[in-house]
Amino acid sequence: MRAFVYHGPGIGHWDSVPDPVIEQPTDALVRVDAASVCVGDLYMLRGEDSEVRPGAVLGHEAVGEIMEVGPEVHSVVPGDEVIVSSISACGYCLSCREGIYGQCKQGGGWLLGHEIDGTQADFVRVPFADHSTHKLPYGLDMNTAVLFSEVLPAAFELGVRNGKVRPGVVVAVVGAGPVGLAAVSIAEMFGPSRVISVDLLPHRLEMGTELGADAAELPGRLIAELSEGPGADVVIEAAGTPDSFTLCTRAVRSGGRIANVGMHNSAVTLHLEQLWRKNITISTGQVDASSTPWLLDTLTSKQMQRLSRIITRELEFDQTEEAYEILATAAEAGELRTALRRPG
């Protein structure tokens, strides 16, 4: 088969590799029909994770068709179209029973494109298929469906749920990338009095308004108003930079919550000399993707249509290298997320 293979820091190519096979009785083999490239993949390509070795197939988000299942797979059968979760979960250990799939104690967690070959390929082996694949709802476009692999569960679990968004609260989302925009849209479902989208780029702020933000502004006056006034009840950090985290600490009210979603690859200063009196709660975490079934059942067709705008580019599989190049300059180029599709 063909796949996007990591050959060392900054080097990846669309190459021929052996087809995957069933290795465990809980595995499924999936023909990949749509995939995506996210910031985590970009970190892998840059060599920022020592667990990824040359020769690895990258990617952890996909939609496709079940081709073969192991003897202990019962929820899907060959021919089913499925969403492949970014996180693999045994479903039975204590962590999985509590919905914390990312901390699976029986060999699950972030495996695809990280510890085993990933989804940017013609075919992928999916471990623990009963809890790591979800049947594709009828009529759901594949480009939108791939957002359920990671983007939407991350926005809900790490941002909206950890932030305890509820009726009447003021929510500020710092960072209007794919996950931040998804958090804006999902937060609206819980009845907040106001949702504010904050970003450095005007075109992303415009998208924040389209996805449901009541206000979308550059950091500056708006953050100053929040920090000098009562502040936001919930601040969702979705940019993953030291400056964005500092903005969150300024915008949150006393007794409020900061829900960190962004992936930080550099140190962040926690100004406890300023924060110790504010009685704030800071949550962090890796996406579990245990909420995917709930999101599939709960999001309306109108919401899904709106969220589909997060996909701003579609390329074919053999253009995966180009997708990484687009992601590296996505903010400045006005891009959000690229979908990779099987030719034809």
Image (cartoon, rainbow, N blue to C red):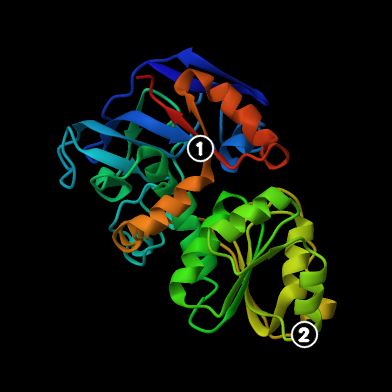
Tell me which label, 1 or 2, sits earlier in the chain. 1
Q: In which quarter of the image is residue 83?
A: top left
* Mark seen at residue 229: 2
Find residue 12 and report its horizontal and vertical position in percent.
59, 21
In 3D space, how far apart are the residues under numbered discs 1 and 2 (Cα atoms)? 44 Å
Find residue 229 and report its horizontal and vertical position in percent.
77, 85
Find residue 188 and report its horizontal and vertical position in percent.
49, 70
Q: Residue at x 35, y 29 (%)?
A: 32
Q: Which residue is drawn at 77% across and 66% down?
A: 247
Query: Horizontally, is 159 left or right of 343 in the view?
Result: right
The amino acid type, in three-letter code, at marker 1 is: His
Q: Is residue 50 visible?
A: no
Q: Residue at x 55, y 63 (%)?
A: 184
Q: Which residue is drawn at 49% across and 14% down?
A: 15
Q: Which of 310 and 90 is in front in this view?
A: 310
Residue assigned mark 1? 114
Neighbours of disc 2 within 10 Å: few (<14), some (14-19), many (20+):
few
Q: Is residue 283 visible?
A: yes
Under circle 1, the secondary element is: loop
The amino acid type, in three-letter code, at marker 2 is: Gly
277 versus 115 height, above or below:
below
Q: Which of 223 and 71 is in front in this view?
A: 223
Q: Do the residues labelled 1 and 2 touch (CB within 8 Å)?
A: no
119 versus 216 height, above or below:
above
